Image (cartoon, rainbow, N blue to C red):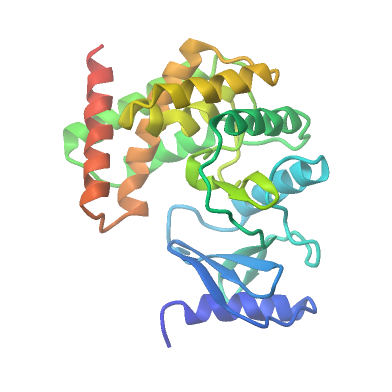
Amino acid sequence: MTDIDLPIRAATETAIAHGITPDRCDILQNSSTLVLRLTETLVARVVQDVDGPRQGTEWFARENAIAQHLTELGAPVIPLHPALPPGPHEHLGYPMNFWEFVTRIDAESDPREIGRTLRQCHSIMRHFAEPLPHLAILSESLAILQGRELFPQATQQMLRDHLTHSIEVLSIYPQQPLHGDAHMGNLMNTTRGLLWTDWEDTFAGPIEWDVASIIWNAQILDEDHAMVQAICDAYCEAGGTIDDQALHHSLIARAAVMTAWYPILYPNPNEERQTRLQRRIDWLQEQSAI
């Protein structure tokens, strides 16, 4: 038996229990979350890291609820699969949920479409009635740093200081439901158009957090200012407003969050990931000195 045999069994048995017979098992992703295509239209996402920082299914329930809300109101998102209850499901100790399969196309995402679709999601999420935790990923990251020694002491303290300050500063800006982890990897260019996915980090905060998340690499690592400007312009042209100070503080907070999670997400990083991590740390140290 391989490491993924049990989560695969959990997903297939759950599908069968709801009247769906899997006719394939295509592995689309194998990391802390296992993503499986089980039929022509059905995709399962199974949490493999059951001993990680997130326990239980409460966060999965929030993801399902916000995804349902967005789908019902026509947002550009990958939908939950309609043939199963939204869940979250749990079997053999593995939390999971089920999504429609979408066909990815091999084309770069238009920056203006990125900004427009993010604004469309934000506009629809404003009417989401269920309460969401306030600045959750920031508080969660701070708790991780307080409970684990992941970096040298000086770096660990710097990250804690940034996150503590970010929670205080970002709390003063208008809050609404957010994607929570709106980076390029959670945006798919498909035959249905540009679609957002992976809503497990959804929380309440300033919209600038999501904007900072989608532009961070382009702004700081790649210095692709034309792309950043196109995304922000399209977001505003679609009816959004971006506060420059809130965006600046969100960029710092995003860097601190990503750095805190890096050793958990990538316990054995390759050279490229190590370089990117160090560049984030160096940039955060520069912000500390300003």
Q: Is residue 287 left or right of residue 228?
A: left
Query: In this orientation, does residue 72 appear?
Result: yes
Q: Quadrant of the N terminus?
A: bottom left
Residue 140, how many percent across, how many down?
A: 46, 40
* Residue 119 drawn above or below residue 71: above
Q: Quadrant of the C terminus?
A: top left
Residue 97, how many percent across, how many down?
A: 65, 62
Identify which residue is drawn at 75% across, 59% down.
86
Identify which residue is drawn at 62% across, 67% down.
44
Residue nearest the viewer, comparing 203 with 110: 110
* Residue 169 drawn above or below residue 89: above
> In the orientation shown, which residue stands out farthest toward the front?
107
> In the orientation shown, which residue stands out farthest toward the bottom?
1
Residue nearest the viewer, comparing 84 with 49: 84
Q: Quadrant of residue 74?
A: top right
Identify which residue is drawn at 49% across, 82% down.
5
* Residue 217 drawn above or below residue 101: above
Count of residue discs: 0
Q: Quadrant of residue 162?
A: top left
Residue 30, how many percent across, how many down?
A: 45, 67
Residue nearest the viewer, comparing 58 with 7: 7
Q: Quadrant of residue 196?
A: top right
Residue 50, how many percent across, how many down?
A: 48, 64
Q: Is residue 7 left or right of residue 272?
A: right
Query: In this orientation, does residue 177 appear?
Result: no
